[in-house]
Amino acid sequence: MNCPRLKSWFLERYNFDEIRDLAKQKLVPIHKYEIWYLTGGITLFLFIIQFITGMVLSFYYIPYFEHAHKSIIEIVTKLNMGWFFRSLHHWGAQIAIVVLFIHVWSCLLLKAYRKPREFLWFSGFILLGISIFFGLSGYLLLWDERAFAAVRVATGGAGNLPVVGEFIKAFLRGGIDVTGDTLTRFYAFHVSVLPLVTLLLIGFHILLVQYHGMSVPLSVKKEECKETPFFPNLLYKDLIIWLVVLGIVVTLATLAPPEIGKKADPLAPAPENIKPEWYFLFLFQTLKLFPGEILGMNGETIAILLISAGILFFFLIPFFDRKSQRGEKSTLFTWIGVIYFLYFVIMTIIGFIS
Amino acid sequence: MKRILTALIGMFIIAADLFAQQDTIDVFPAVPYDRFIVYQNLIIFWAGIIGLIVIIKMKLREIERTQKLGIDKEEKDIPVLD
Amino acid sequence: MKIDFSLVTRRTFLNTLFGGWLVAFMGGSLYGLLKFAFPTLGKEPDFVILKPDDFLNIPANSVKPFAWGGKLGLFFKHSNGNTTALKGVCTHMECNITYIPQDKKFYCACHKGWFDENGKNIEGPPPKPLEFFDVTVEADKLIVAKKGIKVELPKA
């Protein structure tokens, strides 16, 4: 569209040429691992879909435990395309977490955390935790039997942490047990606290990416890489993959809408074979591996300590991986990354089939 | 003028198609009639996405062609009309 | 007739195609989203079912309110015993109207509009008469329907 008068109106007030020159300078290296560069953008796109569908759903959802379940049934049965947007929100969340894990592991295995990008890794790790909490808090909002029991298990597990466990459990639950207060609290997290924190962190994360540029894996010789401009070449490639992902999520949402179970009853016994959402399964299975008591100490506490140690190591990997800090190949940490990945996948699969 | 017209007609056809077919997704589609409308909309949606991807690929090809020719960079020391 | 040069540059063609298709795609998606976000804009029921006992025995020259979707409906018994129903919403700015039995007129307090007992606007700002409904009694149901709507009850 050519509107010279409109363009000159803006140009008399703002210097767009400077911004355009700055944007043209953003170059991205081309090499055989460049496809992994797209994973961050896909995660961002899916989160945007979640924000939009979440916003429209929040017009109709009632976060009071007496009405929550019914309000979702009303959304799904009575409103125009309500079932579709709820289904889209559900599948968007599942695929977002899948792509998020792919993004995290690709950064781990390609060692994008090495100097100077340590803060990208740290902010990314916090974002991972926040996303999982997004999933947990959103899941409870359904207030059906499965969600209720699953959240009871998850918050109960957090309570097994030594020293801070009880405090965290009470903070999450809003009391001693999972009640209507928990629902209100999780709703506040899901709709207000977490989105704001996520926005800030994602802004910080993306800003750092602009500052540092894209990390080139150690096995590729950086000097021999050709570079393409981000605007418009890679932006278009991003758009193409985003459209494909949108198509996949919409197809899943249309053909496999999620169910709604019976309304939760706090006094009823837990339903048979209760399992948390799939991204918690590996933790769940790990807990099951440990016997009730080891050497007189609570088995679960030991399990949680070990898990916490594993997660802490994961978080601080940039400091442990000395070799990649110096820019050398670090096969030990590649193997550590592979082990983390295999452990996650195998435990999740076992959790599924048991 | 002609290109504006063709673009408008194209947009109108797609928008009208979407408009005409989208009215009745009110409930969880159990009735086959409603279900087929949902499937039809899904196919139209995919047609839209694939069309967009094809067009973007065309644009990418063109941009890479011009970039290879090297004609998209600004010439240095070009006289400025002041 | 073959011309020696193209009327449109490759760039313009591609950009217009891209822009047009993108607008149509986003427009269609946005339409679905907005349909969900604004569901009951302007939607009223085609008919409403009431209990006959509650309404048929009201005294003459009085009204009894009922719910017409989210709006006010008035079941009206004239002084000669004829029953009818109307939408109790003023045609000026959609305030709820009330019936003044002494004057046999409907009154809207918002801008002091008056309607006679047949709904015609006789005084004040209202531009149109009140909307009346068709009333039928079927078995044990009192059916109030929009004029011209054919009511088909589901066989329970």
Image (cartoon, grey):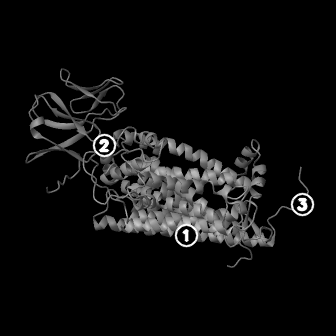
**Which one is nearer the viewer's eye here, B79 or A257?**
A257
Pointer 3 or 1: first along the chain: 1
Distance CA(mark 3)–CA(mark 1): 39 Å
Considering only vertical position in the picture, is B55 above or below A26? below
The amino acid sitting under disc 3 is: Lys
For disc 1, the neighbor class at 10 Å (few under 14, some 14 to 19, many from 20) is some
Q: Specify the subunit that label 3 lies on.
A: B
Q: Specify the subunit that label 1 lies on.
A: B
For disc 2, the neighbor class at 10 Å (few under 14, some 14 to 19, many from 20) is few
Q: Position of residue B68 (x, y in %)?
A: 78, 72
Report the quarter where the N terminus of chain B lies: bottom right
Answer with left or right where residue B30 lies relative to residue B23: left
Q: Specify the subunit that label 2 lies on.
A: A
Q: Secondary structure at mark 2?
A: loop
Residue displayed at 45% across by 65% down: A347
Q: Looking at the rendered structure, which numbered label has been put on residue C15? A: none
Distance CA(mark 2)–CA(mark 1): 43 Å
Q: Position of residue B15 (x, y in %)?
A: 48, 61
The amino acid sitting under disc 2 is: His
* Residue tagged 1: B51
Distance CA(mark 2)–CA(mark 3): 68 Å
Q: Secondary structure at mark 1?
A: helix
Q: Secondary structure at mark 3?
A: loop
Answer with left or right where residue C126 lies relative to residue A217: left
* Residue tagged 3: B76
* Residue tagged 2: A67
Answer with left or right where residue A57 lies relative to residue B49: left
